[in-house]
Image (spheres, helix red, strand yellow):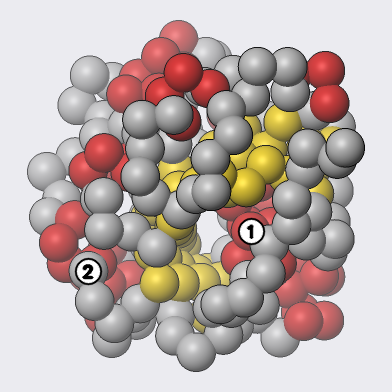
Amino acid sequence: MDVYGRITKPFWDDRPVAIVGGGPSLVGFDFERLRGGAHVLAIKSLIDTMPWADACFGQGMWLDRLENLQSRIYWALPQDQMAGAPHAKNITFLRRLDGQDVSENPSEVYGGGTSGFGAMQICIHKRAKRVVLFGFDYDGAYDNGSPDKHAQKKRAQSEANWKVWAAHFGVYVPHLNRLGISVVNACPTSSIACFQKVTLDDGVEMLR
């Protein structure tokens, strides 16, 4: 029996999509500003801050938390980590592939080193047309003020690692262009160089 599912409708081509990560640019941010008017995809523990989000995405061994979440969950795991995965109607497991590539198969994603990278493929599978990234700093400056507890644990990673992970997003550009998907990053200081950068306030306005 295949333990993996696939992403299906409802699709997100009717409204903009906000992907919300745990970068320090969101410290003190009022997340209610993202509520209403746009689809919202929360990454990992950001779903605790935004339980009203359309869905939560993550990858890796976080299975003990998933059983307690009531939101729609999309979670990417390789086959060898599926043992003990919880079975619940609100959880869709996707096959996580190694490497930095882009899958258009709605049952799988490439990991790319971070859940932020994988979350972009969720938007492709959901047929989004406009995406705004929030908290995608990727500069290694994750501290105790970060709204994402998982990101706090990653703060010990070197700045060089974050630069490498940021560069991985470049593989998305030809796919996004071909599919007609626009992506902007609402963090002007982000290390991700391949997307247009706007201010946090401008990013919020783009969701209206």
Q: Nearer the viewer, residue 68 or 206?
A: 68
Residue 97 higher or lower than 37, as above or below: above
Query: Which image quadrant is residue 80 in?
Result: top right
The numbered mark at residue 150 is: none
* Quarter where residue 181 is shown: bottom right
Q: Quadrant of the N terminus?
A: top right
Q: Which residue is mark 1?
A: 122
Mark 1: secondary structure: helix
Q: Residue at x 11, y 43 (%)?
A: 28
Q: Earlier in the sequence, mark 2 or mark 1?
A: 2
Left or right of 153? Residue 60 is right
Q: Which residue is mark 2?
A: 35
Q: Is residue 55 above or below residue 79?
A: below
Image position, residue 21 (x, y; %): 41, 45
Crowding at dot 1, Cα within 10 Å, few <14 / some 14-19 / many 20+, comes out as many
Crowding near pointer 2: few (<14 within 10 Å), some, many (20+)? some
Name the amino acid type tagged 2: Arg
The answer, for residue 204, to whether it is visible in the render is yes
Q: CA distance from mark 2 to mark 1?
A: 19 Å
Relative image position of residue 180 (x, y in whole percent): 71, 86
Secondary structure state at the residue bearing disc 2: loop
Q: Amino acid at mark 1?
A: Ile
Q: Residue furthest top?
A: 156
Q: How many marks?
A: 2
Q: Is residue 193 above or below residue 197?
A: above
**Image coordinates for residue 79, horizontal then vertical, percent:** 84, 26
Q: Residue at x 26, y 50 (%)?
A: 51
Q: Could you tell me which quadrant the C terminus lies in?
A: bottom left
